[in-house]
Image (cartoon, rainbow, N blue to C red):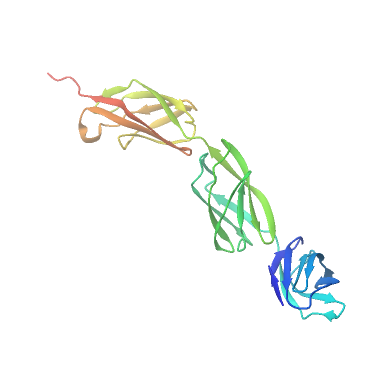
């Protein structure tokens, strides 16, 4: 005989199929000292729902002709999740999250709110998963489903990407040092501001305003440059948003 799957949740409820011969009219299927619920039966198979249990137990099928040889069934407890990293990401999804815990070997799904993704199991204590798209910004619960069940307890926050509206002033000297007010949206989690790749000092005033100090012009030459704002929600780039100008000469 064969049993599939050969493992399931300690809470019971796993759909198990036992295949073999002379299995017609099975009267019971025992998982150790407990009896499973038979849901279908043919001469070569018995479908049964496992009862609750722990550890490794022998599984036997009983018919009017007697009781079969035992097969092993392994009970698995629900997973435990200790943390995930990172804990935020873009609403569009796509970034990779690492989840640490125990009992993760048989993980088949990770749920981010109502969205589901398939994980890559690294080992019993760790898995990685590409975050699915969210329905909108904000926190969602994260749960992992394994052969042992589903466990909640972690949270992930979706963040909308930033936008850039205006820069005031939108020009300044090539030596830098111009204080610029940058307006836009979703700026609270700003991590960096660059002028053609050159990092600019900044302060977050509000979700719609940044105070930025222009760096020296890249290459020391005048002309327009792209301004980019990076937040936990992504990067927004405004092409030719700031113009470096040469100072007066005598």
Could you say where residue 236 lies in the image, as x and y percent from the top left?
41, 33
Asked whether 211 or 29 is in front, the reply is: 29
Seen as rendered, the residue at the extreme right is 64
- Residue visible at 49% across and 32% down? 188
Could you say where residue 103 lies in the image, as x and y percent from the top left?
64, 62
Could you say where residue 84 lies in the image, as x and y percent from the top left?
56, 51
Quadrant in which the N terminus appears = bottom right
Placement of 164 over or under 27, stated as above or below: above
- Residue visible at 61% across and 54% down? 109
Image quarter of residue 149: bottom right
- Position of 66 with respect to 135 (left or right) is right
Asked whether 179 or 168 is in front, the reply is: 168
Quadrant in which the C terminus appears = top left
Could you say where residue 207 lies in the image, as x and y percent from the top left?
50, 28
Image quarter of residue 146: bottom right
Placement of 45 over or under 155, stated as above or below: below
Seen as rendered, the residue at the extreme left is 250
How many marks overall? 0
- Position of 30 with respect to 93 (left or right) is right
- Position of 246 with respect to 190 (left or right) is left
Asked whether 101 or 204 is in front, the reply is: 101
Asked whether 214 or 99 is in front, the reply is: 99
Image quarter of residue 199: top left
């Amino acid at each position: 005989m064969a049993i599939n799957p050969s493992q399931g949740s300690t809470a019971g409820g796993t759909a198990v199929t036992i295949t073999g011969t002379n299995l017609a009219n099975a009267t019971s299927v025992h998982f150790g000292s407990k009896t499973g619920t038979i849901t279908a039966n043919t001469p070569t198979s018995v479908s049964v729902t496992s009862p609750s249990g722990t550890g490794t137990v022998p599984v036997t099928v009983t018919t009017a002709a007697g009781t079969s040889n035992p097969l092993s069934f392994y009970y698995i407890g629900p997973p435990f999740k200790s943390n995930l990293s990172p804990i935020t990401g873009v609403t569009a999804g796509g970034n990779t999250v690492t989840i640490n815990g125990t009992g993760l070997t048989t993980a088949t799904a990770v749920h981010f709110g109502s969205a589901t993704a398939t994980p890559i199991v690294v080992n019993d204590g760790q898995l990685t998963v590409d975050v699915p798209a969210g329905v909108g910004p904000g926190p969602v619960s994260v749960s992992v489903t394994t052969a042992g069940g589903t466990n909640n307890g972690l949270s992930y926050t979706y963040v909308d990407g930033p936008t850039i509206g205006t820069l005031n002033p939108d020009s300044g000297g090539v030596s830098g040092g111009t204080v610029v007010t940058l307006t836009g949206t979703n700026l609270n989690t700003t991590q960096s501001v660059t002028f053609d790749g050159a990092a600019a000092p900044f302060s977050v005033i509000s979700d719609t305003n940044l105070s930025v100090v222009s760096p020296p012009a890249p290459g020391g030459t005048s002309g327009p440059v792209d301004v980019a704002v990076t937040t936990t929600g992504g990067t927004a780039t405004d092409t030719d948003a700031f113009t470096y100008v040469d100072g007066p000469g005598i």
